[in-house]
Every structure is written in structure tokens, then in C-alpha cells.
Amino acid sequence: MRKTFLSLVVATPILLGSCKVDQKKEAELPEVDVDIETAAGQLPSYDVDWADVNVGTTTKTMEIPKVVVVMEEEEVEVPYLDVDMPEDYGEKTERTLRVEAEIADTTHNLDIEKIYANEDNLIVVSSLEKGEQSLGNKTMRISDQVTLNAPDLNVKYYIIGERPEQVFNSSYTYVKDMETLKNKLEGYQVIYES
């Protein structure tokens, strides 16, 4: 009984380290009688709250590549994440999570596939897929974005696919497939999926 209680006492802070915790009951150790009679103890109980995430869309004016070098502004529907964190994370600020790639020779599609969260960390996972239409000897930039309304969070970007050779593409980490990210995503939960 004592080993179980000590294990719970040690494990509880580790498991609850990333959440807002309100203790509802005090811990009570078992009473021990000299005749080796024991009364059952009481473990503490907790209410655990994490972020409440609302996913929707919002209209933004942004630059859309129309021709290789020319950018035009258009109103488009952009995914919008409104994240309510526990009070101690600070005020929310609206910002854009954007991935970009510079491609040559052939068209590509770049899409934000999923966003993962753990405490005050986000991981944005995108995919870059090669198309079939030729660009000739031209290059162009492609992008995707999600608007985030949340307290200041740490963000890491990963793009699944082959990194194009242009120097511009060194701003992001490219990986072969989702399996490569498996260890990095342990403990994270999906808060957005396209």
C-alpha cells in the first residue's frame, strides 16, 4: 500500500505538469493501529483543464501567386484557430502560421496538414507534393497558412517531402515521411487537421 501511494505521489506532478490543476481534496494517509489494523487512506483528487480550441475560418487579404514573379492580393478563406489556454499563459494575439517553398521546373502543392500542441509548443506539419504541369525554366513561391489567435507559443515547422534546391527553402525542416516525426510528436495532441 505504501509503495503504491509513493508511486502515485511521484507520478502525479509529472503527469500534470502541463495542465492547470485545481486540488479538490487533501491527501489523507492511512491510519495504522498497533494491532496491525488499518483504515483505508484517501488519495487527492484533481480537476484538470487544458486549452479549449475552436477551429473555423476567417477571411484574410493575402498575396496569391498568379504568375511566376507577380503577386496579387485576393480575399480567400483561411483556417482560423482560436485557442483558449489556462489563465497563466497570458493574453491572446492573432498571428499567421505560414509555410512557403520556392519551386522550379514543375508545379507543386504545399498544404498545412496538421498542427500539434503540447503545453506552450506547437508543431506545424505540412506536405509538399510534386505536380505534373511544367513551369519551364521558371521558379515560383507557393505557400499555405493558418491564422492563430492564442497566447505566445513556440512554433516548429516540418514539411514532408523532398526539399527543392533553391536557397529560400532552407528556412524549414524537410522530412521524408510522418514516421520520421513520430518521436517528436510524443505527448502532443492534434488541434488542427486540414
Image (cartoon, helix red, strand yellow):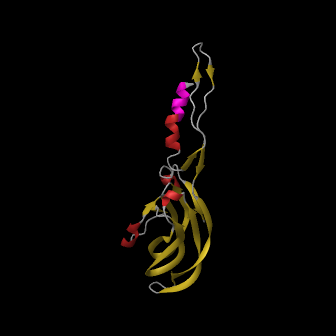
* Residue at 49% from the left image edge and 59% from the top image edge: 89
Judge left or right: residue 136 versus residue 34.
left
**Residue found farthest to the left:** 167
Q: Examine the structure image and report whether residue 5 is included in the region drawn in magenta.
A: yes
Instruction: Decide: is 172 above or below 25.
Output: below
Judge left or right: residue 158 versus residue 78.
left
Observer-nearest residue: 80 or 123? 80
Q: Examine the structure image and report whether residue 112 is included in the region drawn in magenta.
A: no
* Residue at 49% from the left image edge and 42% from the top image edge: 14
Overall secondary structure of the magenta stretch?
A: helix
Give the quarter of the image for residue 111: bottom right
> Quadrant location of the C terminus?
bottom right
Q: Can residue 109 be seen in this view?
A: no
Q: Position of residue 29 (x, y in %)?
A: 56, 28
Give the quarter of the image for residue 173: bottom left
> Quadrant location of the N terminus?
top right
* Residue at 60% from the left image edge and 43% from the top image edge: 24
Q: Is residue 135 visible?
A: yes
Q: What stretch is highlighted in magenta?
A: 2-8
**Residue found farthest to the top:** 35
Instruction: Decide: is 23 above or below 113.
Output: above
Give the quarter of the image for residue 59: bottom right
Q: Position of residue 83 (x, y in %)?
A: 56, 63
Q: Where is residue 42 in the image (x, y as percent from the top left)?
A: 61, 32
Q: Where is residue 172 in the image (x, y as percent from the top left)?
A: 42, 65
Observer-nearest residue: 149 or 146? 149
